[in-house]
Amino acid sequence: MRFGKIGMAAVAAASLVSTPVLAQAVQPVSSVARTGATVEKANNVEGGSGIIIAILAAAAVIAGIIIAADGSEDAPTSP
């Protein structure tokens, strides 16, 4: 029984060690390099929206501070 546990531990350790070696990418058979498609009219999608998001985030932070610092000194209604 004890040898079975040791054997299983050895198999598990060997599989953990050998998995990265076996998972390495092999060289492709053909030496054709992949190239991207040509684009005639590209859109600059990421350019202008970053400033708008930053302004909205700043407004949300300021609104949260104002709501949290509300100076109402109401006493609780429960005794």
Image (spheres, helix red, strand yellow):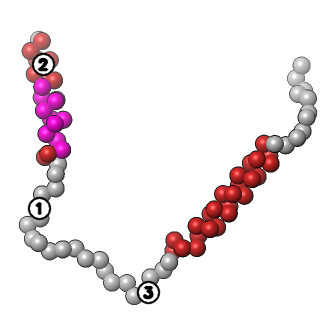
**Is disc 3 placed on a helix, strand or loop?**
loop
The amino acid on which the numbered mark 3 sits, given as a three-letter code, is Lys
Task: Give the magenta-colored segment's residue range.
Answer: 10-20
Q: Circle 2 is placed at which residue position?
A: 6
At x 29%, y 77%, the residue is: 36
Query: Which residue, as the protein is rendered here, is positioned at the far top?
Result: 1
The amino acid on which the numbered mark 2 sits, given as a three-letter code, is Ile
**Is disc 2 placed on a helix, strand or loop?**
helix
At x 80%, y 46%, the residue is: 67
Q: Nearer the viewer, residue 53 or 79?
A: 53
Residue 7: where, in percent of width, then height?
Answer: 10, 22
Q: Circle 1 is placed at which residue position?
A: 27
Q: Circle 3 is placed at which residue position?
A: 41
At x 74%, y 48%, the residue is: 64
The quarter of the picture where the N terminus appears is top left
At x 81%, y 42%, the residue is: 69
Measured in 3D between alpha carbons, the distance from the residue under mark 1 to the one under mark 2, in whole angstroms, is: 37 Å
Quadrant assignment, res 6: top left
Residue 24: where, in percent of width, then height?
Answer: 16, 51
Quadrant assignment, res 68: top right
- Label 2 vs 3, first from the N-terminus: 2
